Amino acid sequence: MKRFGKLGSISYENEHYVLDYYPLEGQSQAPSITLHPLVVYILDSLDKQLTLTEIVADIQTRFDIAPADAQEITDDVDVVFESHFTDDIETNTITVDIAQLQAQLITLSRFEKMTTRSSVFQGNRSPFPLSLQWLVTGNCNRKCVYCYQGAPLSSKTEDSTVDINVLKRLIRETAQLGGKEIMLTGGEPLLREDIYEVMIYALEHGLTPDFISKQFVSVENAQRLAHAGLKDAYLSIDSLEKDSATALTGIGGFAKKISQTVKHFVEAGIRVHAKSLLTSLNANAYRHTLEQLEQLGAYSIVIDTYSDNLQRHDDALHASDEQQRQVRQVVDEFMLTKPKLQVVFRNEQKAKSMDYSIDGFVCHNGRTQLLFYPNGDISRCDKKLPGGDMIVGSVLNQSVYEAWTSKAMLESLDPPREKYKGTPCFTCDSFDTCNIRGRCYYGAYMSTGTLYGPQEGACKYMLGVKSVC
């Protein structure tokens, strides 16, 4: 029986419901966060072992919440606060007057339409980061022709200067808050010599290390990760056909090495998920690639299509409509063989529609995940954008919670209208809606040449359907 209270306790203080975290060893003051009354009510219901279906029905009728909103709010609370529940607690750590809480919510429901964005994600962001995203290094030992980071060809990681003790502190602090994962990106994240130590430390503290890599992984390292509890590995595999793999990565022998890596992970009991980018160079290689992944025992592959970027962009890399059609046919024919390999083909160049009344997440950086660079700078974007506006702090001198709640971070999520002078956004009637939903600064720069402007494909006043994020 899972009970709330693994990471902290909830009480009513100064007319607010507060989650007080338990301090880490050596931590002078643990974080505290204010919770919406409805979140507290749902957490208490989960603590009392009510099912999600029962909770949805209860809050829908008791507080006059629309069915779809009741479902979404309940699901979000369950997902966001999942790490706060444990089998090891018997006492109640939610010490609030439930009758008073119910009365407050009944009153609140008369004046406020309660949705997940007004309750669970106040300000349209999680109360704490659900994940860390660490851009481990800007370097890479491949030279992929489409690299959006423009990573220099190098097997060294001299730019990755965040000390391992800082990384371990960040892992502990993220786990303390209820975070679930650390995402390792690059460049090539597995180049850093102590990266396996970092991943194992994360697993030991309840965070799942997620990475997308083209790097060779030995039998020994695959076994180490499996023993520490890693369940899934994500590999960037555009082709397993020798010539197209070499053309895309700029390095000979890639197809052989990455095939060995897949084999090592599978034999260690780790599910392998391939991520593939369809370009004009590998469009004819997918039949071979799918068959090889099936033979190697890979679990899944997701195929996306190449899109423009600020670094190594070449229009010639775009797969033609005919090539995309052929890949679609190859995938369909492959699926008729009933493979164990799961295949998803996502054609990103198809027209997209957007409901501008929905305030979902455009970008998760700063909303559900905290991103930092190889030198420790905290950024709102993992792309290399001009200017310093995207740097909002540093993990070297800020705790995870301090960075998450900093003035610079919050202002980057809710930029003032004045920054958009000279663009259609400045006078737009949907300006505040876009701030709530979130903005893609990279998409804006690719569309208009400025960070503070509209994004093609994500703006109802701009023609076109292209989206780069």
Image (spheres, rainbow, N blue to C red):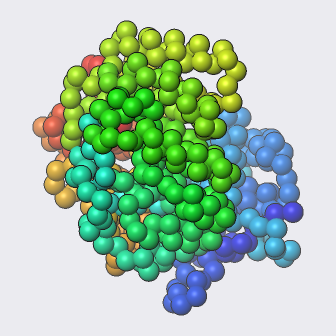
At a point 45% along the width and 45% down the height, the residue shown is 257
Q: Which corner quadrant holds the N terminus?
A: bottom right
Which is more toward the observer, 371 or 265?
Answer: 265
Side of 377 where 418 appears, left or right: left
The picture quadrant where one finds residue 93 is: bottom right
Side of 331 where 94 appears, left or right: right
At a point 37% along the width and 41% down the height, the residue shown is 253
Residue extending furthest left?
422
Which is more toward the observer, 385 or 187?
Answer: 187
At a point 63% along the width and 80% down the height, the residue shown is 22
Residue 306, horizontal then vertical, whole percent: 34, 29
Residue 440, horizontal then vertical, whole percent: 33, 41
Vertical relation: 352 (above or below) 374? above
Side of 186 where 462 appears, left or right: left
- Is residue 327 visible in the rendered image? The answer is yes
- Is residue 425 visible in the rendered image? The answer is no
Side of 332 where 198 appears, left or right: left
Vertical relation: 76 (above or below) 67? below
The total number of labels drawn is: 0
The picture quadrant where one finds residue 336 is: top right
